[in-house]
Amino acid sequence: MTTARTEQPAPDYVPGHALLEGRTVVVTAAAGAGIGSAVVRRCLEEGARAVVLGDTHERRLDEARASLAAEFGADRVAAVPCDVTDESRVASLLDAADPFGGVDVMINNAGLGGTVSLLDMTDEQWCKVLDVSLTGTFRCVRAAGRRMVAAGRRGVIVNNASVVGWRAQEGQAHYAAAKAGVMALTRSAAMDLAPHGIRVNAVSPSLAMHPFLAKVTTPEFLAELKGREAFGRAAEPWEIANVMVFLASDYATYLTGEVVSASSQHP
């Protein structure tokens, strides 16, 4: 039996070190306040030539683009509504990177969850989560990979998985299956794209705190999840974004087909 850990303070924010200087980055599910928005900001702070944001929520997307453009320059930020279940929308998102020289880094953050017992889960619930979280990632990997190959570019693809793909969690059969699939997709895609010099890796977070998460779960359950973490707290979204940026950078040139666990959870 384990006991809840004492919550440790979050670390100070880490300044940029030009890890992505001159690169064009495309990020899905990039509006709002979660990992996607954190990685967009991190990429700009790390010197990306431009970042193209995609999201299904057009109002939040416009607000994110305007805010980032005001801070980092309108010539470095673009935004395109994108539903990763629609191949044509994925193509339009990547088209938006062309004025910036084409995609160098593709970060696939889009995912859909939900909590429901397998006994009560409908086919529609199962298929919707799989279509966004797994098949949507596949569509983006395929589309970005094809463009990188055509351009002769040694690009990088980073997928967002989850520790639920490794660990059992009640009510998460569809999400767990999707994220385990993302891990397997990452490993296989890495082998297919390696002959072209393209790297494919994934990050597997456990618990990253943001306002939307607080809205869709109870304070009691969040406290329970945080109590399982070694530091007694959830990750800050920017801490997960840092791992994504590392995988996209030249500090990770010999890493491909890897799933990096960004988790402090103890057994």
Image: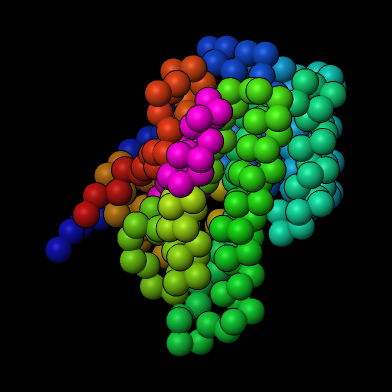
Q: Looking at the picture, does residue 117 appear above or below residue 229?
A: below
Which residue is pictured at 81% across the width and 27% down the height? 98
Which residue is pictured at 50% across the width and 30% down the height? 195
- Residue numbers of the magenta segment: 186-209
Q: Quadrant of the C terminus?
A: bottom left
| Residue 141, percent from left and from top | 61, 44
Residue 186 located left or right of residue 69: left
| Residue 245, percent from left and from top | 52, 27
> As rendered, which of 152 and 169 lies closer to the eye?
152
Q: Is residue 41 magenta?
A: no
> As rendered, which of 64 and 113 lies closer to the eye?
113
Which residue is pictured at 33% across the width and 60% down the height? 167
Residue 139 located left or right of residue 225: right
Tell me where residue 144 sits by quadrant: top right
> As rendered, which of 53 and 7 lies closer to the eye?
53
> As rendered, which of 114 and 87 lies closer to the eye?
87
